[in-house]
Image (spheres, rainbow, N blue to C red):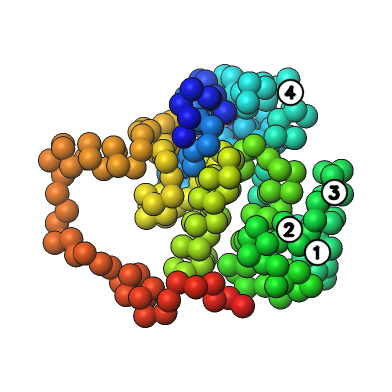
């Protein structure tokens, strides 16, 4: 994470749907090369905020810049810099993965090697498989590959591990970290706090369209402990998920 380089700046962001404020004065910055998590309950305003940053939804007031470009004035420049996870329902179920990558790269008007893109997400063996033949984890990995086609500077992932088994989730965490380590900034939303804790460099908690806390997971946890918080139950050195992983292994298994 490089604090000196701000990739996304959100200032006093407000989004109203009629007289309901879904986003109610948000302020935060995302730094170059970090994994930044937006956390919060259903309806808190996370997706709305992401869609405004992605230039897919107009803001009501405030200012949002992406790599210095204003979302209200430089939509095209921003679209070239970002990778957005497309909803799976939009994929043509009868095309194979190679054909789908070719289709998407055609939409971006660029040429990529489909096999190279698929190998980034460990799906090279599935190059000739149809999308509908993939497991849940493979579908998620494929959708992450589609975000990387235009070689983006920033990637947005909206709940990328929902519905996956523990192995598939952990493998996806490794993949997302690799993408960050290769120089990409990542903004993610998730409802899984364990995921946010191991994956995110910094997290913002959003509630009712406002940020109620923003820091590294370590700092947020340390502050809570300093305030006198204690868990009721004795904390064990492992949990049931650790048992699952230790019994079944951690390799890619949805083959
Ligand atoms: N197009 C719309 N018109 C009216 N209200 C909307 C619209 N889109 C979202 N909302 C409302 O804005 C609020 C924030 O929704 P948003 O989808 O941003 O929340 P979220 O934090 O992403 O929730 P989730 O975790 O469930 O995805 C919700 O109360 C939602 O009903």
| Distance between the alpha carbons at the discs numbered 2 and 3 | 12 Å
Q: Is residue 211 visible?
A: yes
Q: In the depicted view, which residue is nearer to us: 100 or 126?
A: 126
Element under disc 1: helix
Which is nearer the N-term, disc 4 or disc 2?
A: 4
Residue 123: image x %, image y %? 67, 67
Element under disc 3: loop
Element under disc 2: helix
| Distance between the alpha carbons at the discs numbered 4 and 2 | 31 Å
| Distance between the alpha carbons at the discs numbered 4 and 3 | 24 Å
* Residue at the spot of label 1: 98
- Residue at the image position 78 percent from the left and 29 percent from the top: 76
Which is nearer the N-term, disc 1 or disc 3?
A: 1
Ligand 1 within 8 Å, label 3 CB: no
Which is nearer the N-term, disc 4 or disc 3?
A: 4
* Residue at the spot of label 4: 74
Q: How crowded is mark 1: few (under 14 residues within 10 Å), some or many (20 or more)?
A: many
* Residue at the spot of label 2: 116
Q: Of the residues tagged 1 and 2, which is closer to the observer?
A: 2
Which is nearer the N-term, disc 2 or disc 3?
A: 3
Q: Of the residues tagged 4 and 3, which is closer to the observer?
A: 3
Q: Is residue 108 above or below residue 114?
A: above
Q: Is residue 132 visible?
A: no
Q: Are marks 2 and 3 in contact (CB under 8 Å)?
A: no
Q: Identify the disc placed on residue 111.
A: 3
């Amino acid at each position: 994470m490089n604090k000196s380089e701000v990739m996304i700046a959100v200032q006093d962001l407000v989004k109203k749907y009629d007289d309901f404020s879904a986003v109610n004065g948000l302020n935060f910055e995302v730094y170059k090369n970090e994994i930044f998590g937006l956390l919060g309950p259903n309806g808190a305003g996370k997706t709305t905020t992401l869609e405004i940053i992605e230039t897919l939804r107009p803001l009501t007031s405030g200012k949002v810049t992406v790599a210095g470009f204003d979302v209200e004035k430089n939509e095209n420049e921003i679209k070239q810099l970002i990778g957005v996870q497309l909803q799976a329902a939009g994929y043509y179920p009868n095309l194979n993965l190679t054909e789908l990558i070719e289709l998407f790269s055609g939409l971006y008007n660029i040429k990529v090697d489909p096999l190279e893109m698929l190998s980034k997400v460990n799906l090279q063996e599935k190059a000739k498989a149809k999308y509908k033949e993939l497991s849940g984890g493979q579908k998620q990995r494929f959708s992450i590959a589609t975000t990387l086609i235009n070689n983006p500077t920033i990637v947005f992932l909206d709940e990328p591990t929902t519905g996956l088994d523990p192995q598939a989730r952990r493998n996806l965490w490794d993949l997302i970290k690799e993408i960050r380590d290769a120089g990409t900034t990542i903004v993610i939303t998730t409802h899984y706090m364990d995921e946010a804790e191991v994956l995110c460099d910094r997290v913002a908690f959003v509630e009712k369209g406002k940020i109620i806390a923003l820091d590294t997971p370590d700092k947020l946890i340390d502050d809570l402990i300093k305030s006198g918080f204690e868990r009721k139950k004795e904390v064990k050195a492992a949990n049931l998920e650790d048992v699952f992983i230790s019994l079944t292994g951690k390799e890619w298994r949805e083959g």
